Image (tube, grey):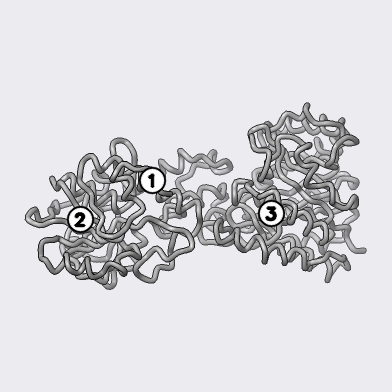
């Protein structure tokens, strides 16, 4: 007997974590049309939320009426659903199902809110909606807690009950454990759903296992086109649909999904990346909310072993929900606490001007001007976080990843590092070690950018002015570096964040030191008190 398997596509909802749900209306229509042509069984159209104020170009919806424009061309054979995060939407404002454009509501909730979720689910059932009951982070439940929940679910009798691998960390043995508990104890008329994330690349294998079981109940497999979703992403709709065609004699049309990838999602991925990464693997292995790893990765300052050390400090009670203040504190504390003692202070020569060479691409175009300044012998030349092609007096590093990349090629006596960096070179052989903790703050605000660190060093040593070359600012879909750089700021939001942080820092530091640009920089307007260009 072949199992009854339905595919639920959550591209427009789970995929919204990638772009803040800012899908253009025309793109929403194209995605829904592709899913319609592909004959996907259930389409999740987005979130219902009272927190949004947008009425266009967004899949966070204030009400169901907003959805009408998008769903009217869908086949009546396709079930249309939306998700509500418990507490984010007033369900009393929902119309009855017979006056609604959707068929079902997916109600997501955390373990501690089970009783409230049961009450709300009953209200949704009274409105005749199909209720998809979705307890987040299945792994948080002990066997007894899970069985108790199933008893309550059987009383509720929803359309579907879900196994949810929120962190993408559920291996086959763990998955089988919860699957067997659910299948043996859940009423047979209740569908069993599976929602996965792909941090350990287990989403597809677990789904295949589920589809291979000869069950007397309906199965629902969640997926998204191109695997679009937060962090490591989701199970790919095109892959699970192809599997079902070949193994379960289904008849999904794969080409419309591939065309959406080709025409829309590949471009979106270039701006807002998702998929497997070492940091997302660590997140899953430690059973953490994926945003913790994403936060540290965006810093782009520490290698993966340091990321692991920071993530391991997150207490058990904080693992399931993202706490930005906590991870920010852990990150800063780690950098400050890892600083080694300084035996001898370092001082820059006071009889020369300071020329700082950042790794921006503009140094190539303006190399003659830079060489002319260096050849004048008037400058102490310092390269920042890279091995410059220009002759330098010092190479200054405050970024562990950059230092690790270049340390083999550096002359120790010309190398300056902040004391939070780990090095195999004996301290006495280095040109100097700089106190990171004293230079990483402007007032009470923390900055780890090397340009901020060096400017604070110059200010602390009494320098009144400095010149920058190569402080271009980050630009999207352009080479930002004067050397081959493979570890770059790859997403649009990362680039905006880094540029904004630098703008804020320069606007404060320019009051303490005169900053001049030898090469073009997007930060020139900040120094000249004009509106910044972002």
Q: Which mark is residue 416?
A: none
Earlier in the chain: of badge 3 and badge 1, it is 3
Q: Position of residue 351 (x, y in %)?
A: 7, 55
Task: Write down the residue under mark 3.
Answer: 196
Relative to 515, is 271 above or below? below
Q: Residue furthest left?
A: 351
**Marks 1 and 2, Cα distance to the nearest angstrom?**
34 Å
Discs 1, 2 touching: Cβ within 8 Å: no
Crowdedness near tag 2: few (<14), some (14–19) or many (≥20) residues, C-alpha within 10 Å: many
In the rendered structure, are the residues bearing label 3 and label 2 in contact, judged by CB atoms less than 8 Å apart?
no
Foreground tag (3 vs 1):
1
Q: What is the crowding at mark 1: few (fewer than 14 residues within 10 Å), some, or many (at least 20)?
A: some
Q: Earlier in the sequence, mark 3 or mark 2?
A: 3
In this rendering, position of residue 276 left or right of residue 393: right
Secondary structure under tag 2 reads strand
Q: Is residue 194 above or below residue 94?
A: below
Residue 502's x, y, as percent? 35, 48
Please name the residue shown 28% across and 67% down the image. Answer: 366
**Residue 532, numbered label:** 1
Give how far apart the Cα atoms at labels 3 and 2 are.
47 Å
Q: Residue at x 27, y 73 (%)?
A: 409
How far is the residue under mark 3 from the one under mark 1?
A: 42 Å
Q: Relative to residue 426, is residue 12 drawn left or right? A: right
Disc 1 versus disc 2: nearer the observer: 1
Q: Is 524 positioned to the left or the right of 143 in the image?
A: left
Q: Position of residue 432 (x, y in %)?
A: 17, 58
Q: Which mark is residue 433?
A: 2
In what element is the residue under mark 3?
Answer: strand
- Whether 247 is drawn above or below 442: the answer is below
Q: Is residue 407 visible?
A: yes
């Amino acid at each position: 007997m072949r199992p009854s398997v339905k595919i639920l596509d959550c591209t427009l909802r789970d995929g919204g974590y990638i772009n803040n749900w800012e899908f253009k209306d025309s793109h929403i229509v194209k995605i829904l049309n592709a899913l319609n042509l592909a004959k996907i069984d259930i389409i999740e159209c987005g979130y219902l939320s009272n927190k949004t104020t947008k009425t266009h170009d967004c899949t966070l919806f204030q009400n169901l009426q907003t959805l009408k424009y998008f769903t009217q061309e869908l086949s009546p054979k396709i079930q249309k659903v939306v998700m509500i995060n418990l507490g984010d939407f007033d369900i009393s404002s929902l119309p009855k199902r017979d006056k609604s454009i959707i068929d079902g509501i997916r109600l997501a909730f955390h373990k501690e809110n089970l009783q409230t979720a049961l009450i709300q689910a009953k209200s949704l059932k009274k409105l005749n909606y199909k209720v998809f009951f979705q307890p987040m982070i299945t792994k948080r439940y002990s066997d007894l807690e899970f069985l108790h929940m199933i008893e309550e679910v059987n009383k509720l009798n929803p359309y579907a009950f879900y196994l949810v691998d929120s962190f993408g960390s559920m291996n086959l043995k763990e998955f089988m454990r919860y699957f067997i508990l659910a299948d043996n104890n859940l009423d047979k008329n209740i569908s069993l759903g599976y929602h996965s994330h792909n941090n350990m690349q287990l989403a597809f294998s677990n789904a295949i296992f589920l589809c291979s079981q000869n069950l007397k109940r309906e199965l629902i497999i969640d997926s998204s086109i191109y695997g679009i979703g937060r962090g490591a992403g989701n199970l790919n709709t095109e892959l699970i649909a192809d599997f079902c065609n070949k193994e379960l004699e289904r008849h999904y049309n794969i080409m419309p999904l591939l065309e959406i990838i080709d025409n829309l999602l590949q471009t979106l991925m270039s701006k807002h990346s998702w998929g497997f990464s070492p940091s997302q693997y660590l997140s899953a292995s430690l059973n953490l909310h994926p945003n913790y790893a994403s936060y540290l990765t965006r810093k782009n300052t520490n290698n993966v072993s340091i990321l692991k050390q920071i993530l391991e400090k997150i207490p058990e009670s904080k693992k399931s929900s993202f706490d930005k203040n906590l991870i920010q504190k852990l990150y800063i504390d780690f950098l400050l606490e890892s600083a080694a003692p300084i035996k001898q202070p370092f001082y820059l020569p006071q009889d020369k001007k300071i020329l700082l060479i950042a790794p921006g691409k503009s140094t190539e175009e303006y190399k003659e001007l830079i060489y002319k300044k260096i050849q004048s012998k008037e400058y102490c030349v310092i390269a920042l976080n890279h091995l410059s092609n220009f002759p330098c007096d010092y190479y200054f590093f405050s970024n562990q990843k950059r230092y690790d990349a270049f340390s083999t090629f550096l002359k120790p006596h010309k190398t300056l590092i902040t004391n939070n960096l780990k090095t195999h070179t004996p301290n006495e052989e280095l040109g100097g070690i700089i106190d990171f903790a004293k230079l990483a703050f402007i007032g009470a605000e923390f900055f780890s950018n090397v340009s901020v660190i060096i400017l604070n060093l110059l200010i602390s040593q009494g320098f009144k002015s400095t010149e920058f070359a190569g402080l271009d600012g980050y630009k999207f879909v352009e080479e930002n570096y004067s050397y081959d750089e493979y570890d770059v700021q790859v997403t649009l939001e990362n680039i905006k964040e880094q540029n904004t942080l630098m703008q804020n820092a320069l606007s404060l530091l320019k009051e303490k030191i005169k900053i001049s640009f030898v090469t073009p920089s997007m930060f020139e307007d900040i120094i000249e008190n004009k509106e910044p260009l972002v």
